[in-house]
Amino acid sequence: MSYSDSSVIITGGSKGIGLSIAKVFARETDRPLVLLSRSTDDLVKAKQECLDAGAASVEIIPADITSEEINSIDFNAYEPGILINNAGYFLYKLLAETTEKEFEDQFHINVMGAFRLTQKVLPFLRKQDRGLIVNISSKAALKGVGDCGAYSMSKHALLGYTRSLREELKDTKIAVSAINLGQTYSTSWENIDVDQEKLIDPEDVGRIILSLSRLSPRSVAEEINLMPQGGEIDPV
């Protein structure tokens, strides 16, 4: 299996940013898609949306990336060339009001999920002629954020992991990139009174990753910061 024919694994791929990324690849490539999320119902709907958008094939994996069930999945069977660690959870809460469980959950979902999936997929990528790992981080990874400290902590950790993985793999043919997102429209904004046109179009995230996948083996975009054109809007 060559890199150009390999599949794209997308965590959190059943809705929001993950589904938007999948639809871009569905429209623009013939790559097989592998969508991973906890909800089977959401995955079934997402699969059909991707097929309607033009995907050559779509596999779905209902699984919780924070659980041990991930260890029983043979990701090699999907012949991946690209891993997009997108699954995450945003906690809008002051640190003084955050429980220990909430703090731990932010770390496990936003960091350990990406680590666990990468550990599973990386051995196969090493055997390929090329590979790409993209971790969806946040502008909250670049500075402290007062109203979502636990989330900011987790994204700092994810970015640190991404940077270290990049250093570890720089002498291989596996590129590692982080995309630090500003406010991007997703389902989490549905009940918030905000003009979605002022938020980042989630398909722009997919377009960026598609471009990264088409770079020559001689180049890597280590980090990309993507922000709304008009700057941050309330609530930040």
Image (spheres, grey):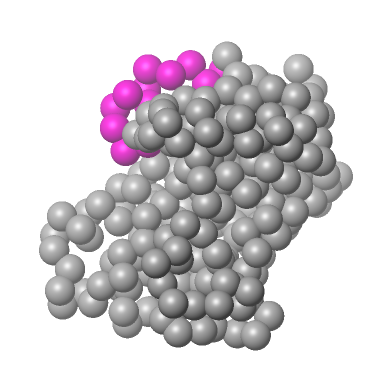
Above-or-below relation of 22 to 128: below
Q: Quadrant of the C terminus?
A: bottom left
Q: How many marks?
A: 0
Q: Is residue 93 visible?
A: yes
In the rendering, at what x and y percent does residue 164 appear?
Answer: 52, 53
Q: Position of residue 220 (x, y in %)?
A: 74, 52
Q: Can residue 117 be seen at all in this image of the molecule? A: no
Residue at horizontal 41%, vertical 81%? 235
Q: Quadrant of residue 131?
A: top right
Which image quadrant: the N terminus? top right
Is residue 156 shown left or right of residue 20?
Answer: left
Residue 103 relative to residue 10: left or right: left
What residue lies at 56% left-to-right and 53% top-to-bottom?
17
Q: Residue at x 32, y 24 (%)?
A: 69
Please, is residue 94 above or below residue 105 in the view?
below
Residue 72 within the magenta-colored segment of the rendering = yes
Residue at 63% of width from left, 36% of height from top? 49
Most foreground residue, 4 or 60:
60
Task: Tell me if residue 33 is in the magenta stretch.
Answer: no
Along the line of sight, the residue nearer the viewer: 175 or 114: 114
Toward which corner of the image does residue 136 lie, by quadrant? bottom right
Q: In the image shown, does 36 or 134 lie closer to the viewer?
A: 36
Above or below 81: residue 208:
below
Task: Give the percent coordinates (x, y) of residue 217.
Answer: 82, 42
Q: Give the vertical position of 72 relative to 157 (above or below).
A: above
The part of the chain drawn in magenta is 65-76
How far from the left and from the top, in percent, is residue 60? 52, 25
